[in-house]
Amino acid sequence: MATCPICGERVGGLTGRRMPDESMIQKARAAGLYREGMCASCLARAFSPAEEEQARMQDAADNFFLSPAPVPEGATDLGLVTGYCILGTGPLPALFSSVSDILGMKSSAYSEKAQAAEREALALLRENALRKGADAVYCIRINLTEATSGKGMLMMSVSGAAVRRAAPAARLADIMARLQK
């Protein structure tokens, strides 16, 4: 029976501390944390500081904003804003679209649903931008996907870079001030 080089307890067998599994040992070796014969408890404690550091890096990455849009001169980049809408299409549009698909026609039923979802997603994007204190959104991306693998739900998502220009319109400045409270 081996002895853990960290705590000095026996490792393995019926009375010893639990041995780490092979995947845990491989992760620890890759991170430079493993010492031959370590028990699972000591190995888990060795990971804690490394995991805390990784969590701090993830938190920093989550709060770091990258934008492909150049911010206009004199404007302030306020970060990413999003809007979305998940919309059920219902059985009738599905029926009409299958008929129009067979006939090779345009499906106005789905087009109308997609336009409604786009309007809703853009409205939410504008609201989120205003809440951040922005008066413009640059580099908008619009994406339409099926949200439920054939179950008739569409998801429209929009995103962009929220920007506060140097001199926002007075009406917008008033709305932004009220939303910030």
Image (tube, helix red, strand yellow):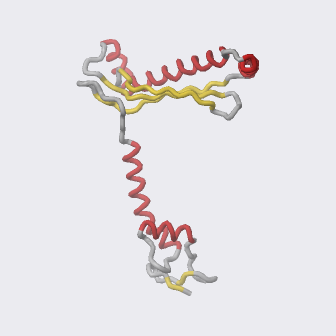
Q: Seen from this angle, which residue lies furthest bottom?
A: 1
Q: Taking 38 as reference, is 54 above or below it?
A: above
Can see residue 181? Answer: no
Q: With respect to residue 37, does 49 lie above or below?
A: above
Give me the residue at 48% from left, 71% from top: 43
Q: Residue furthest left?
A: 74
Name the image quarter holding residue 111.
top right
**At 31% across and 29% down in the image, what residue appears?**
70
Residue 67 point in image, percent of width and height: 36, 34
Quadrant assignment for the C terminus: top left
Image coordinates for residue 40, horizontal then vertical, percent: 53, 73
- Horizontally, is 95 left or right of 61 in the view? right
In percent of the image, x 37 and y 27: which residue is there?
Answer: 162
Q: Quadrant of residue 5?
A: bottom left
> Quick check: 33 above or below 59?
below
Total marks in image? 0
In this rendering, is residue 53 above or below 91? below
Residue closest to the far front:
104
Quarter placement of the N terminus: bottom right
Measured as percent of width and height from the top left, residue 149 is found at 68, 35
Which image quadrant for residue 170? Answer: top left
Q: Is residue 172 left or right of residue 166?
A: right
The answer to whether residue 142 of the structure is visible from this angle is yes
| Picture coordinates of residue 68, whole percent (x, y) | 36, 33
